[in-house]
Image: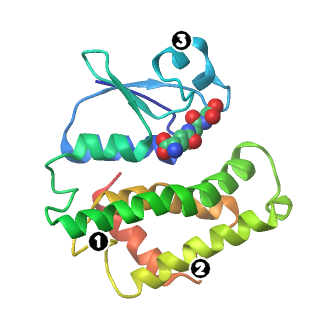
């Protein structure tokens, strides 16, 4: 299997984390997103979305969207709960991550770290959205060690991917002891 990705991208790192945790072998193909390589015709021919990550199986089939890829690669593993309700809770967090978290935390971090914007120039609504997402996480983690049940699941890996870089986008974690402790817990397993 090939993974097309850029290691500056949390979405791409999610796929790497899962493969490393589950001992799935892969060839990593570097795609420089800042240089626009994901939009090159040969990339778009394989993945119409023109973004990374995407995977290419040995038989040529491809799959994009980080959370869909993680779910596919983790099928039947300890990273997906057996219980149907817990599995749905995991999906709840995966959808939330893409709609309410990544779209603020990752975007702010990209603008500051890779597009040269000052934190003070960030869009106010974007910053508010990111702070709200972190507040939701902090509240959940004040009552639980993991996002679903009593062990690490794909929900933790998805949320870890960009929360670990939140401060690069100007978000402060110093007032978020539960997120900070959870980041440490996840980091002990995932890297
Ligand atoms: N929802 C997608 C987001 C993918 C995405 O935003 N990829 C970015 C890197 S993190 C990308 O390829 N950007 C380059 C571009 O749009 O040209 C996922 O979870 O995989």
Q: Position of residue 106 (x, y in %)?
A: 60, 53
Furthest-top residue in this view: 42
Cα distance between the residues tagged 1 and 2: 24 Å
- Give the distance between the C-alpha atoms of the residues marked 3 and 2, in whole angstroms: 43 Å
Tell me if 19 is positioned left or right of 75 in this view. Answer: right
| Mark 2 Cα shell of 10 Å, populated few (<14), some (14-19), many (≥20) | few
Front position in the image: 155 or 113: 155
Q: Residue 119 vs residue 74: left or right?
A: right
Outermost residue to the bottom = 143
**Residue 11, position as x, y percentages in the image:** 48, 45
Kindly state the secondary structure of the residue where label 1 is placed: loop
Look at the numbered disc 1 and say if its residue's Cβ is closer than 8 Å to ligand 1.
Answer: no
Residue at 59%, 27% in the rendered image? 32
For the N terminus, which image quadrant? top left
x, y (%) of residue 120?
84, 64
1 versus 104 height, above or below: above
The outermost residue toward the right is 121
Q: Which residue is mark 1?
A: 148
Q: Which residue is mark 3?
A: 42
The image shows residue 185, relative to residue 45, as above or below, that is: below
Question: What SS does tag 3 mark?
Answer: helix
Residue 90: which numbered mark, if any? none
Q: Is residue 142 above or below residue 151?
A: below
Residue bearing the label numbered 2: 174
Query: What residue sits 19% from the left and 46% below the top?
Result: 75
Q: Earlier in the sequence, mark 3 or mark 2?
A: 3
Q: Position of residue 83 (x, y in %)?
A: 15, 66
Q: Nearer the viewer, mark 1 or mark 2?
A: 1
Which tag is nearer the camera, tag 3 or tag 2? 3
């Amino acid at each position: 299997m090939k993974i097309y990705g850029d290691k500056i991208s949390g979405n791409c790192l999610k796929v790497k984390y899962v493969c490393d945790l589950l001992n799935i072998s892969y060839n990593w193909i570097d795609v420089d997103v800042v240089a626009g390589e994901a939009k090159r015709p040969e990339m778009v021919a394989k993945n119409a979305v023109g973004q990374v990550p995407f995977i290419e199986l040995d038989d040529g089939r491809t799959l994009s969207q980080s959370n869909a890829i993680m779910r596919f690669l983790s099928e039947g593993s300890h990273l997906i709960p057996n219980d149907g309700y817990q599995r749905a809770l995991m999906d709840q967090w995966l959808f939330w991550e893409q709609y309410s978290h990544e779209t603020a935390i990752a975007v702010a971090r990209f603008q500051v770290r890779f597009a040269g914007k000052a934190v003070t120039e960030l869009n106010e609504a974007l910053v508010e959205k990111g702070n709200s997402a972190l507040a939701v996480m902090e509240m959940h983690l004040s009552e639980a060690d993991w996002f679903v049940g009593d062990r690490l699941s794909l929900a933790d890996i998805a949320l870890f991917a960009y929360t670990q870089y939140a401060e690069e986008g100007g978000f402060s974690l110093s007032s978020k002891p539960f997120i900070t402790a959870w980041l440490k817990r996840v980091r002990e397993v995932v890297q």
